[in-house]
Image (spheres, rainbow, N blue to C red):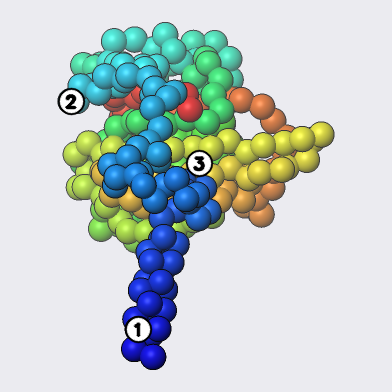
Amino acid sequence: MRNHSARFFSSMATFLAASLIVTVSGCRADSADEALEPWQLAQKSEVWEPLPAIVKAPPDAPPSDARVLFDGKDLSQWESAGGGGAEWTLEGGVLTVAPGKGNIRTKRTFCDVQLHLEWRTPTEFGDLKGQRRNNSGVFLQERYEVQILDSYENPTYVNGQAASVYKQHIPLVNAMRPPGEWQTYDIIFKAPRFEGGELTEPAIVTVLHNGVLVQNHVEILGKTEWIGEPEYEAHGCAPIALQDHNDYVSFRNIWVREL
């Protein structure tokens, strides 16, 4: 009985060990794999192509495959949302809202993007509070707003503070620097999909504010509205827009990567 038991348990151990060797697809490996060395088994799951494109990412500069929308030199990439040239103020490499001149937008249209921009609110704001304290916004496809606002020690409705998807998603945290300091937004946006005029996939956005994750792959519910419920209307690629909310909000270092 002892010999039979020993053979039985030895056979079971061999069987279980062989069962642990699996292929990349998750199925049990064939018997030929049992004779392979571990490094040979590891090679079976290595993928060598296609090779990712090489992108240079120098410090404090746009990636080599980015489209620069504003580098402090000119407004050649922008136009007025109402038509004609962009009439905001360009001084010392900084772009500032010219109150009353209206929104500006990119001349080029975009769908899925990685967008980087830096913005700053003035240090002088008197007794202005809430939504009146230096308000602007960046609109993806001219419809979906990530709010820009001085939200440093400035309470307001939380789905309207800085880094909110306006009136839809509250930021996970408030990562504001004080007024007068430059803020950064890094936005990854997947555009909505439509088929036959009907929505098939909603827009998705991820936002980092000053390097801090504040919107984590959230679903945009439709056009961001000041009043009323968000709804979708079918559209294609569209410009990126910056808002004139009658406040002197400034911008620099704006670039985009098409995904």
Choose mark 1 or mark 2, whichever is in front: 1
Q: Which residue is disc 3 drawn over?
A: 145
Instruction: Identify the residue at image location x=35%, y=74%.
Output: 10
Find residue 3 and name its label. Answer: 1
Which element is circle 1 on?
helix
Q: Quadrant of residue 144?
A: top right
Q: Which is nearer the eye, 74 or 221?
A: 221
Q: Amino acid at mark 3?
A: Glu
Q: Residues within 10 Å of mark 1 (few under 14, many from 20)?
A: few
In this view of the protein, which residue sits in the foreground, 103 or 64? Answer: 64
Question: Distance of mark 2 from mark 3, alpha carbons?
Answer: 28 Å
Residue 254 relative to residue 167: left or right: left
Kind of residue at badge 1: Asn
The location of residue 48, given as percent across then percent down, is 38, 27
Q: In this rendering, would 85 be left or right of 43?
A: right
Residue at 42%, 73% (x, y): give it.
Answer: 12
Q: Which residue is mark 2?
A: 59
Q: Earlier in the sequence, mark 1 or mark 3?
A: 1
Q: Which residue type carries mark 2? A: Pro
Q: Residues within 10 Å of mark 2 (few under 14, many from 20)?
A: few
Position of residue 2 measured from the top left corner of the image (x, y, whole percent): 34, 89
- Where is residue 38 shown, x and y percent of the image? 29, 47
- Place residue 51 in its image quadrant: top left
Q: Residue at x 66, y 54 (%)?
A: 229
Q: Is residue 53 above or below residue 234?
A: above
Mark before the other along the chain sequence, 2 or 3: 2
